[in-house]
Amino acid sequence: MRRFRIGSAFGIPIQLDLTFLLVLPLFAWIIGTQIEQTAAILNRVGAGLDAEVLTEGLLPWVLGVAAAVGLFAGVVLHELGHSLVATRYGYPIDSITLWLFGGIAQLDELPEDWREELLIAVAGPIVSVGVGLAAGLGFLLVPGDGVAASGARFVLGYLAVLNVALAGFNMLPGFPMDGGRVLRALLARSRPYARATEIAAEVGKMFAVLLGIYGLFVFNLFLVGLAFFVYIGAEGESRQTVMRAAFEGVTVRDVMTPADRVTAVDPDDSVRELIETMFEERHTGYPVERNGAVVGLVTLDDARAVRDVERDAYTVGDIMTTELIAVAPDDDVMSALNQLEGNEVGRLIVLEDEEFVGLLTRTDVMTALSIIRSSPDYAATDESDATVFRPQS
C-alpha cells in the first residue's frame, strides 16, 4: 500500500500507510458508539463519569476522534521506544509506519545479540506502560465538573487503560510481536540464533492460530486479520533468518551460473528463434550479447508479449530489457537476493571489472539453500550460528 510521510522524530521518518486512513475513522466510530460501556468500566475504578453528559449531541464523536488519535499517538511513542534503543546499539531505523494493525519500526538490520534484542523488544511495552501511567495521572488531576472536564477525563482514562492493555497484549509470545522477540532473545541465550528464531516462530504461529479461532468465535474480523499477519510475519522472518544464517560467508560467485555455462542470445535473433531456444534448453531468461558485451536481458514474458504472427518480424533487440541490474561476484548472496526481490526480477547480471562473469537467478539461490541445509558435505559453525557453503575436498 502507498505510504505518506507526515513528519519525523529524532531523525526517524514517520509514515502513514493508506490502511491507517481506513482504520482511524473506524476506531473513532467504535469508541464513539461505546461511550456508555467504556464509562461504566472506568466508573468501576472510581472515575465518576456521567454517561448522559458524555453522549449528548456530537460529543461522542468528538471523544471518539480524540481517543483514536491519542491511541495512535501512543503507538508512535511505543515504536519510538524500540527505535531509540535500537539506534543506541547502532541499528539504524528506516522509518516508523502507522498502518491497519498499529505501528512498525523498520530496522535496516536485525540484532543477533540476545541482550540487545531483549532490550529493544521490551522498550516499546515499557514506553506504553509509561504513557498509560501518564494518562492515568492526568485523569486523576483533571477536575470532574463540566462537560469539557468530563470529556477530557474520559479520553485520559480510556488511554490509560488501553496503553497498559496494549503493552500486555504485545508481550504475548506471538512472534514477531514484542513478546515473541523477547522469547527469541531468551531462547538465543543457549541456542543458535536461527534455531531460536524457528522455535519462536512456531510458538508465534500457534498463537496466531488460537487468536484467529477466537476471533472467528467472537465474530471479530480485526482479530482474525491480526492473527493472519502474525502468522505470515512469523513464517517470513523465520525463513529470512534461516537464509541469513545459511548464507553467512557465501558470495555470489559461490552460487551463480558461470558465464561459460550461460547461453547468450543475439539481439538480431527473431523472437520465434528465441522461443525455440527457450523450448530446447528449458530456460526462461537469457542475457543478450553483442560483440562479447552484455547489452540486455530477455525473458519468456518479453517474448509472450509479441503476437505469434509477428514473432518473425520482431527481434530480441526489440523486446529485451536494457536497464540491467548487476552485482559483483564478491557480493554476499543475501544482498543479491534483496536486489532480486526489491527490483522484482528473476535474474541478475554478475559483472567483474565491467566484464560479464555469470548470471544469478532465484533458482540458483534456492538450490544453494537446499544443498546447504540438507547435505552432510557442508559444515555448520556454532560460533557464527551459520551453515557455510563450503564443499569438503
Image (tube, rainbow, N blue to C red):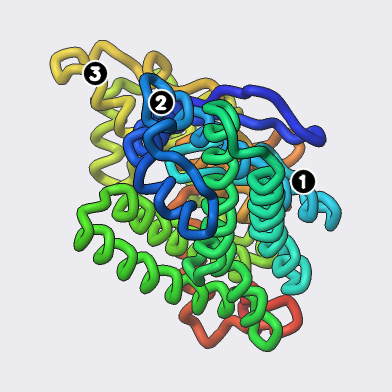
Q: Indicate which disc, 3 or 2, sits on the residue closer to the N terminus.
A: 2
Element type where label 2 sits in the image: helix
What separation in Å lies between label 3 and label 2 (alpha carbons)? 57 Å
Q: Give the residue at mark 2.
A: 61
Find the residue positioned furthest to the left: 309
Please state if 228 lies on the left or on the right of 289 as rendered: left
Name the residue: 43% across, 37% down: 286
Q: Residues within 10 Å of mark 2 (few under 14, many from 20)?
A: many
Question: Does dot 1 land on a helix, a strand or a loop?
Answer: loop
Q: Nearer the viewer, mark 3 or mark 2?
A: 2
Q: Position of residue 221 (x, y in %)?
A: 26, 49
Q: Nearer the viewer, residue 320 or 33?
A: 33
Q: Which residue is mark 1?
A: 92
Task: Depth check: give the residue in front, 131 or 10.
Answer: 131
Residue 288 visible within the image: no
1 and 2 marks in contact (CB < 8 Å): no
Residue 374: image tag: none
Q: Tell me what residue is drawn at x 31 percent, y 68 percent.
A: 209
Above or below for 318 versus 290: above
Q: Nearer the viewer, residue 138 or 161?
A: 138
| Alpha carbons under labels 1 and 2: distance apart | 39 Å
Amino acid type assigned to the residue bearing label 3 in the image: Val
Callout 3 touching callout 2 (CB < 8 Å)? no
Horizontally, residue 361 falls left or right of residue 223, namely right
Residue at image point 60% right, 47% down: 336
Three-letter code, disc 2: Trp
Q: Which mark is residue 306?
A: 3
